[in-house]
Amino acid sequence: MQPGTILVIGTYDTKDDELAYMAKCINSQGGKVVSMDVSVLGDPSKPTDYSKHDVAEEGGSSIKAAIDSGNENLAMQIMARGAAALTVRLYHHGIFDGVVILGGSMGTDLALDVSTALPLGVPKYIVSTVSFSPLIPPERLAADTQMILWAGGLYGLNSICKSSLSQAAGAVLGAARAVEKPRKDLPLIGMTSLGKTALSYMVPLKPALEARGYEVAIFHATGMGGRAFEALAEQNAFACVFDFCTQELGNHIHGSNISAGADRLTNAGSNNTPQLVAPGCYDLVDIVGWHDIPKKWSGNPTHAHNRLITSIVLNHAQRREVARAHSTQLAKASSKTAFLLPKGGCGEWDRPGADLHDGEGLAAFCDEIRKTCPGNVRLEELDCHINDAEFAEAALAIFDDWCAQGIVTPGINDN
């Protein structure tokens, strides 16, 4: 078993004992530790591998500037900027295999920046007094961040907080030893969807794309999945995207907490990644199922998907608003873009005879798409449902044509 090297980050002037305890736990399991101090005012009891001066300077500033700011928020932002930059540089130089960061609210703010800066697949663990708190907005969370509540550890060691600290130490070391990082040998296709009861096009599309020499990653479009998808699109991780569930865009414009952010449906297009787009489940806005339904939805039908998610069925005007939002986002694209419009329905619950079918609502959405679809987008109207075999075949036909033209990176076959 490889020993694994863990970068331990924290304010060593105030959390020296706790950070040293985590290092001891990692060492006791055969791991190695590299330490980084992100404090401002004080000094650690022993020198760290990377000092607070190293951190501040990496961010283009200094500890003196942080102190002279006279503002703890500005000072910690200097340290967060430097810690993120230094951590990324160290990782790319092979200095560590995983990172664990300890903090209260100030340290957590910094930890979120560090985690977001690191690539997907790098084990990253945050031990925080505010883990899982509403203080942490979803957009600050890296796709594979792990967190544990630092219970009972605000000041000093005790048996309660040691339980959290030792778990974190073991978890990050175990992850660093076990992680299978994303492969780079096959071009990657990013696809969005929901569960197979609502959207099932991925069932024929995934093996068909794999047979063409691509790896396929399917993202659950329930807020965090869309954020991960957009983050990877921003990093040019995809050879092409099949963004066929854009419900998160409707969630966002209608004010739902289940949002992938304001940049949904933009990053592939702005990074020259060819994109096939379809409005899967555009007719629904998901809200948190255990919250009271906001008054704005009092006139809309609802569907309780489970105890976590309630779906609001949009009226005709609201569907037109969602259609215009699609066109607004796609108008920003500089990459090859095709919009597939299945005129037979865009979700299993919207088929004729199904509980949420609204033929006039679908017609209103299609009409608004036709009126507003921007000139940089190829609009393909399809006489089928999004879950029909004809939809997947039409998507593959466009994809194959783009491959033949050299628009999409060719797949790699082992045969």
Image (spheres, helix red, strand yellow):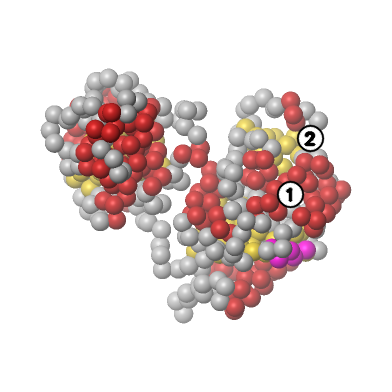
Q: Is residue 11 visible?
A: no
Residue 175 vertical placement versus 288 (above, below): below
Relative image position of residue 12 (x, y in whole percent): 22, 31
The answer to whether residue 359 is left or right of residue 155 is right
**Viewer-side residue, 199 vs 17:** 17
- What's the residue at 41%, 68% (across, down)? 185
- What's the residue at 20%, 50% (across, down)? 3
Q: Earlier in the sequence, mark 1 or mark 2?
A: 2
Three-letter amino acid code at the position of disc 2? Pro
Query: What range of the chain is rendered magenta?
Result: 377-381
Q: Secondary structure at mark 1?
A: helix
Residue 106: name its quadrant.
top left
The answer to if 169 sits in the magenta stretch is: no
Residue 370 vertical placement versus 12 (above, below): below
Res. 324 mark? 1
Three-letter amino acid code at the position of disc 1? Arg
Relative image position of residue 217 (x, y in whole percent): 52, 58
The answer to whether residue 226 is left or right of residue 129 is right
Residue 146: name its quadrant.
top left
**Viewer-side residue, 349 vs 341:** 341
Residue 198 vertical placement versus 318 (above, below): below
The residue carrying mark 2 is 301
- What's the residue at 59%, 44% (across, down)? 262
**Viewer-side residue, 404 vs 179:** 404
